[in-house]
Amino acid sequence: MRFSRAQPSDLQALRTYLYDSFEWRYRGKSIPPPGLHLLSAAKMILSRSQLWKCDGHLSGRGFRDLQFDIHEVIAKAAAQPPAVHGDGLTYRPDFKGLLIALPHKTPFLSRTIVMHDYGRLNLKTVDGMKRVGLLDAAFEERFEVYSNDQVESRALLTPDFMERLLKMDQHPRYTGLQLGFIAGRIYIALPVGDRVRFGSDAVCVCPKQAAAKVIGEIKTVFEILGDVDVLQASVGRKTDEAIQIERQAWYDARIANVESHVTAAIKAGILKGAPMPKWMTQEAYDLIDPRLHGLLSPRF
């Protein structure tokens, strides 16, 4: 992997190398995940063109063997502007963000979705699912729940789970998150836009820039997985402080490993840059057009 201003390189090979070191599988492009169209049918995520683009896909196991899939999903733009039908959806933007899928710890057969409350624009039914009334005023002020099984939906949305979901929703990174309990899995849709990208094409001009960018991406992925892990682990019980500390230490250790793997890649020559004259600083080398390097050599 060689990065230089003369021939800038894409990050995909470096990402693959680093994620392999954690025994995670990374793909720069992927087909739409199985749950995508289920969530689209349930009005959780929107694409007015009904077309989707999936830039990146991560799969692996996190803390305590938590199995996960993360997709970077973008709704393709529609050829025509949406018509106003008064269905409460036309004002919502097309989805652009992350779709996270986790196996649920409790088997269930129903479909339950948790959408943000849009006041008078709330739908009465969603894809055959009816509203679920919950005895939590704070939660119902923020979210609307729909399900085709009222009893099972209340069993899934325990008081502990609702408390942690409200707390997570208050974090700026997770603004607008929505959930779906579908086909035995929990799907989390995060409309993060361009704020969190780990699979898009990105060009870098030197090893230092490439290393910094991919380390930042992986750290963000670990942080999101840690937060989602807390939410998932809380289903039906409180997560005690000892487990929280253990979980944080697990992800912190892997973040530290990312930096050590990049350092090792540079030392081993896997991550290379173009040769730089000894008299030129790294800042100058990165900023100045390579065609001018020869003109900048010292004159005596």
Image (spheres, rainbow, N blue to C red):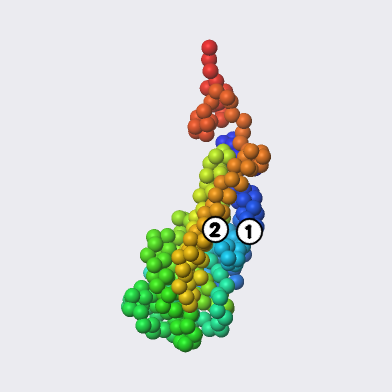
- Indicate the secondary structure of the residue bearing disc 2: helix
Between 44 and 156, the one lying in front of the other is 156
Question: Residue beneath label 2, please?
Answer: 250
The residue at the point 53 percent across, 12 percent down is 300
Q: Earlier in the sequence, mark 1 or mark 2?
A: 1
Q: Which label is found at residue 24? A: 1
- Is residue 168 shown to the viewer in this render? yes
What residue is rendered at 41% in x and 78% in y?
A: 159
Q: 128 or 63, which is in the foreground? A: 63
Q: CA distance from mark 1 to mark 2?
A: 15 Å
Q: Is residue 298 left or right of residue 16?
A: left
Is label 1 in a helix, a strand or a loop? loop
| Badge 2: residue crowd in 10 Å (few <14, some 14–19, many ≥20) | some
Q: Residue at x 53, y 18 (%)?
A: 298
Q: Residue 239: x and y, percent?
A: 47, 70
Return the x and y of residue 95 as percentages of the image width and height.
47, 65
Q: Are marks 1 and 2 in contact (CB under 8 Å)?
A: no
* Amino acid at pointer 2: Trp
Residue lying at the far top in this picture: please name it. 300
At label 1, the amino acid type is Trp
